[in-house]
Amino acid sequence: MGKWKRSQAYADYIGFILTLNEGVKGKKLTFEYKVSEAIEKLVALLNTLDRWIDETPPVDQPSRFGNKAYRTWYGKLDEAPLSPLIWSLVRQEQSHSFFWKTVDLGCVSPPGHEAAFAAFLCCLCKIGVLRVDDQIAIVFKVFNRYLEVMRKLQKTYRMEPAGSQGVWGLDDFQFLPFIWGSSQLIDHPYLEPRHFVDEKAVNENHKDYMFLECILFITEMKTGPFAEHSNQLWNISAVPSWSKVNQGLIRMYKAECLEKFPVIQHFKFGSLLPIHPVTSC
């Protein structure tokens, strides 16, 4: 893990995350931004994956979780006639690793898949497919659509996370939307961290902010008092400002995701994200 933390890949990846974090600061999801052809193609790819879910309904089985129809859906990734450039990057740089290969998620921690997708987007930036003026669209258009597909997979095939920290973890499946979502809320005129545990505030504002959309999804998927099923988030609601929440989540992401072997063990390295140490200027 020490080699990974000192690598050029780590520096480039975390730099990419922080650049996007700064780009979406104080902006709603409904903020007007440029949508390039490359962004549209990525969204079209995700739309295709979403449609396959509709075409691959769950099958009847004794087990409640991990519906085996997911394997059929996943198998279509090998058969799809998608954009050669996009698909070559998916295969060569991050493989299919931003999707769960096993039906019960038994091999990799879900934040590792999220990191693989973010790394895929980082690679597209490094080769010039995505550019500086695509930054907002990367988060609001592409990554948000990715979240919708992931949530649909989780609900349709009743996916269970591997390596969940239960009530002490931030979320079973995602982390980055909490970082970027808290950045969106920095200096908000009236929404404070304490409001995200307020059902009315979440219902009225979730379409504008990724963080609140995450909270809404959690409340839809889990039962019981919020403080019991999402204790870590409950504690975060007591932080006085979104800026402090954002800074704390970035530190937590580094410590609890990027510096954990079960999360990073399947991360792909190559010419775009090399494992060699950071080169000094």
Image: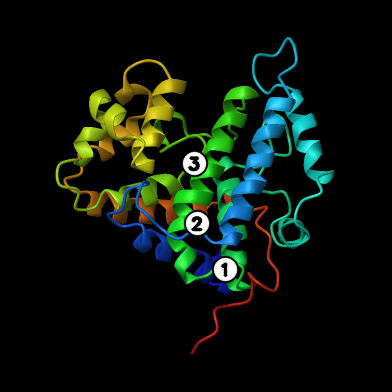
Compared with residue 97, is residue 193 higher up or lower down, i.e. above or below? Answer: above
Q: Residue at x 58, y 37 (%)?
A: 149
- In this image, 203 relative to 190: left or right? right
Q: Are marks 1 and 2 in contact (CB under 8 Å)?
A: yes
Say whether disc 2 or disc 3 marks the residue closer to the N-terminus: 2
Residue 113's spot in the image, x, y percent? 61, 46
Specify the label residue 174 is tagged with.
3
Q: Are marks 2 and 3 in contact (CB under 8 Å)?
A: no
Viewport quadrant of the N terminus:
bottom right
Residue 280's spot in the image, x, y percent? 50, 87
Secondary element type, mark 2: helix
Q: Which residue is mark 1?
A: 125
Q: Residue at x 68, y 33 (%)?
A: 51
The coloring applied to the image is rainbow
Q: Which residue is mark 2?
A: 138
Residue 74 visible, this orientation? yes
- In this image, 149 relative to 256: left or right? right
Q: CA distance from mark 3 to mark 1?
A: 22 Å
